[in-house]
Image (cartoon, rainbow, N blue to C red):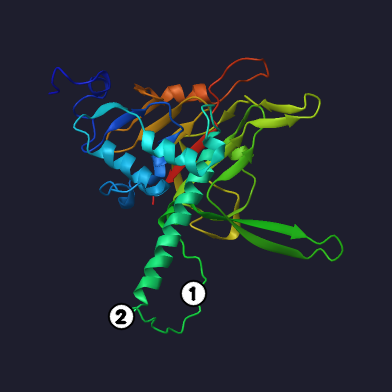
Amino acid sequence: MMGTNASALEKDIGPEQFPINEHYFGLVNCYRLSTSAGLSGERALLQSPAEEEGNLLTCLADLFHSIATQKKKVGVIPPKKFISRLRKENDLFDNYMQQDAHEFLNYLLNTVADIVQEEKKQEKQNGRLKNNGTPVTTETNTENKTEPTWVHDIFQGTLTNETRCLNCETVSSKDEDFLDLSVDVEQNTSITHCLRMRVKKLPMILALHLKRFKYMEQLHRYTKLSYRVVFPLELRLFNTSGDAVNLDRMYDLVAVWSKQRSLHHHSESHGFWLLFDDDIVEKIDAQAIEEFYGLTSDISKNSESGYILFYQSRE
C-alpha cells in the first residue's frame, strides 16, 4: 500500500500499476524535454552527473540522472542547468518567449548526435597514439566517414524521392535520411492520409511534425491551422518504397506534443496516459487524446491540436 505522503498521481495510478524504477516529474518553465520518449532509456543519459559545466548532452544527462535518483516517485524539478546551457549555445532559445517545439526537437537531436560523433572521433584519435604520444600509422579510408550514433539508431529513417524525366520518362530516385518527418495537414483527415512521402527505411521512433502553421499572403504572417487530423494509437505505414526495409513494422503512439502541453503513454503491463503541463503531471483516459485531433471547422477558437507525434516500433 502507498503511504499517506503519496502524491495524488501515485494514488490515481495505483500501487499495482505504478512502474518500478519510474519517476514522473514536471519541469518548471521548460521546453518539451519529453523528447525523452526516445532518449530517456539511453544509458548515456543515466550516468553520474558531470563535475564540469559540460555540453548540452552532459547537461541533459545530469537532468535525467537527477530525476532517476529522486527518492520521490512524483514531483517537480527546475532544469536550470540544461536551460542555461541551451540559451548559451543557441540565441533562438535565449529569451523567455514560448519556443517552437519542432525547432527545439531538431536542435536537440542534431546537437546531441554531433557531440557523440565528435567524442567518437576524439576516442579514435587518442587510440592511435602510442604511450609516448607518437602517432600510429593506419591504412584506412574511414577517417572522414561520419559514423551513426545511438541518436540515429533511434530516430533516423530514410525517404526515397523519385523524379521522372519529362522527355524520356526515365525515373531516378534519391535517398534522404531524416530524424523526423514534416507532414502537410488537411481539414478532417487522418495522419495516414497526410503521410504521402515514400519511406525506404523505417526508424525505431517515428517522429511526425504536423505543419500546423501556414504563411497567408493576404495577412503577411503565419496563421495556425487547427485542422482536425485523426492519429491512431496504432500505425502502419503503407506508402513505402519497393525496396523498403521492415515494411511491415507496426508502431504504437507513445507521445503527443501540442503547443502548450504533452501526452505520454506508459506501455508496460498496465498501459496508461499521462498529461504533462509544465510542472503539472496528471493521469488521463486514452479517450482524452481525441481532444488533440484539432477542430472540425475553421472557427477562431483555442484548441490543443497535436503538433508533434511520436510512434515507437514494436520491434
Above or below: residue 78 compared with residue 300: below
User: Under tag 2, what secondary structure?
Assistant: loop
Judging by the rendered image, the residue that carries numbered circle 1 is: 143
Nearer to us in this view, 300 or 171: 300
Judging by the rendered image, the residue that carries numbered circle 2 is: 132
Packing grade of label 2 (10 A; few <14, some 14-19, many >=20) is few
Residue 253 visible, this orientation: no
Residue 92 visible, this orientation: yes
- Residue at the right extreme, as displayed: 167
The quadrant holding residue 36 is: top left
Task: Tell me which amino acid carries mark 2.
Answer: Asn
- Identify the residue shown where x is 45% and y is 33%: 32
Packing grade of label 1 (10 A; few <14, some 14-19, many >=20) is few
Q: Position of residue 145 (x, y in %)?
A: 51, 70
Quadrant in the picture for the N terminus: top left
- Identify the residue shown where x is 70% and y is 31%: 214
Q: In whole angstroms, how far apart are the C-alphas of marks 2 and 1?
A: 22 Å
- Residue at the front extreme, as displayed: 132
In the picture, measured across the screen, residue 119 lies left or right of residue 106, that is: left
The quadrant holding residue 307 is: top right
Q: Earlier in the sequence, mark 2 or mark 1?
A: 2
The quadrant holding residue 181 is: top right
- Identify the residue shown where x is 26% and y is 20%: 12
Number of numbered discs: 2
Task: Tell me which amino acid carries mark 1.
Answer: Glu
